[in-house]
Amino acid sequence: MAEAGNRIWWKIALATCPIIVLLGSASGWLSNSGFGNPWFDRLAKPSFMPPGWVFGLAWTILYVLLGLALAMILAEPPSDRRRTGLTLFFVQLGLNFAWSPIFFAAHDISLAKWVIFAMAAIAAAAAGRFLRLRRAAGLLLVPYLGWLVFAATLNATIEQLNPRAGSPLVGIR
């Protein structure tokens, strides 16, 4: 059965990669994410903030890697381990798609920080599950985990540099 999974994962990737890239891009576009957003442009940024084009390139590559990893796991035979890995993957992906609307559209820097912290932790758990199911799928998530740590650091630093710039979605801080 594993041999069949080795043969078909790339066919599944023909769907998973563009779907994840398109959904991630839509989340950012609909949220007016990044430079060019007047609210974001006014925020103080850390010295290690990359230029805007880096984010589009990085996220496109990372979303393709996520799509490839997902395809590999979808091609694996059904099991409790596979189901748990996929659940973790989709929960972190939902948080990923929610981050831009929270940060860029709702201007809730603090909530976005907690969302990205949770996303990174859940993505690490998903990568661990994927690694046990199919090593390559788990390894494909490593660059994503690295980027999430970097993005979380950016988010936290922007919050620190702009203590009253956000608009809380929830009343408790």
Image (spheres, grey):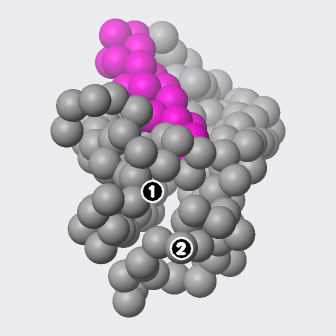
Q: State the residue at coordinates (71%, 69%).
A: 36
Residue at the outermost front position: 164
Q: Amino acid at mark 2?
A: Arg
The residue pinned by badge 1 equals 144
Identify the mark at residue 111; answer none if there is no mark. none
Q: Residues within 10 Å of mark 2 (few under 14, many from 20)?
A: few
Q: Does dot 2 land on a helix, a strand or a loop?
A: helix
Looking at the rendering, the stretch of residues picked out in magenta corresponds to: 79-101
Q: In the rendered view of the protein, which quadrant contains the C terminus?
A: top left
How far across and down, in percent of the image, does residue 167 sit?
42, 45
Q: In the visual, does 160 lie left or right of 86?
A: left
Instruction: Point out which mark residue 42 bears.
Output: 2
- The percent coordinates of residue 102 (x first, y second) are 49, 41
Asked if one can make out residue 33 in the rendered structure from this viewpoint, the answer is yes
Tell which of 110 and 62 is nearer to you. Answer: 110
Q: Split into 4 quadrants, where in the image is the N terminus?
A: top right
**Which of the two discs, 2 and 1, labels the residue nearer the N terminus?**
2
- Farthest residue toward the left? 173
> Is 126 contained in the magenta span?
no
- Along the viewing direction, whichever of 38 and 133 lies nearer the viewer: 38
